[in-house]
Amino acid sequence: MSTDGKADGVKKADKPAILAKTRENLAKIAQWQEKLYADGREGIVFVLQAMDAAGKDSTIKHAMASLNPQGVDVVSFKQPSKEELAHDYLWRAVRALPERGKIAIFNRSHYEDVLVVQVHELQHTYQIAKRCLEDGDFFEKRYAQIRNFEEYLYDNSYRVVKIFLNVSKDEQKKRFLERIDDKAKNWKFSASDLKEREYWDEYQKLYERAINATATPHSPWYVLPADRKWYTRYLVSEVVLNTLEACGPEFPELPKEDKKNLAACKKILLSQ
Ligand code: ATP
Ligand code: MG
């Protein structure tokens, strides 16, 4: 996996055309989402994973801007609460699943349980039976569990589409410095982000491992360059649009009886 978020072969001169294409995609996404909602037969989960300052929040704000809020849930996966830690790690992901017809955006996700947990070996701090830690490779098992979980969802009319915003280490530094220097961005900076940066290489390795172990035809991973926000937003809009097109929802056809009723109602309205 390239860790150069700029390795995308796109030039600054392409920006106006890319912005126009993004707008086009957003308009099409809005139309498809209405159908998805009306059809109500498939649910979609977009998983957003990234290193700090890669732009998860702004991606959600811009690339998903045309989605009707009524049909979208955005769920942030922070450090697990006491209640969450008292359950299996997929519990909170299951609770966050959307109804069919809706879209959920996971801002971080169950993948944290094979990323941050593995980097810091947090599994040893959890209250779980010893046998779970001793029997075979703990994280290999988790990759398989996640694969099975996502396949189970696919077989139950959900799609889980995973996006890794691949920011470079240099760009992260630049964005952290902006957050420190710009008063309006101070609130976005936390010293703990700097601490995690020390584990950069470890995270890159584990992202690669997780992606290779869990990318499947029904639940793909998209690794998107994330150093240029306007380009990242375009790529995310492509992923969202392609996913909706693959679902191919349709407006439900009314049963014959209901169609007759509509015609009768129209007659009444016109006569008033
Ligand atoms: P931002 O910093 O852009 O606001 P964020 O997603 O980094 O967004 P934070 O509140 O800064 O949000 O961080 C959440 C933290 O919780 C992350 O460092 C993440 O790794 C951590 N986290 C998420 N899930 C788990 C988990 N299962 N176990 C331990 N830590 C987790
Ligand atoms: Mg953070």
Image: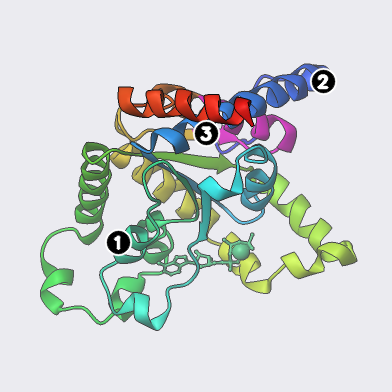
Inspect the image, locate mark 2, and give the three-letter code of the amino acid beneath it.
Pro
Which amino acid type is shown beneath numbered disc 3?
Gln
Is 220 situated left or right of 64 in this image? left
Query: Distance of mark 1 from mark 2, alpha carbons?
Result: 42 Å
Picture coordinates of residue 262, whole percent (x, y)? 46, 27
Disc on the earlier residue, 1 or 2? 2
- Which residue corresponds to the image point at 69% horizontal and 21% vertical from the top-left? 24
Residue range in magenta is 223-241
| Total numbered labels placed on residues in the image | 3
Mark 1 vs ligand 1: CB below 8 Å: no
Q: Earlier in the sequence, mark 1 or mark 3?
A: 3
Which residue occupies the extreme front position in the image?
A: 271
**Labelled disc at residue 16:** 2
* Helix, strand or loop for the magenta stretch, by majority: helix
Residue 114 falls left or right of residue 180: left
134 in the magenta segment: no
Ligand 2 falls in quadrant: bottom right
Q: Which residue is mark 3?
A: 33
- Report crowding for label 1: few under 14, some 14 to 19, many 20 or more residues within 10 A (C-alpha): some
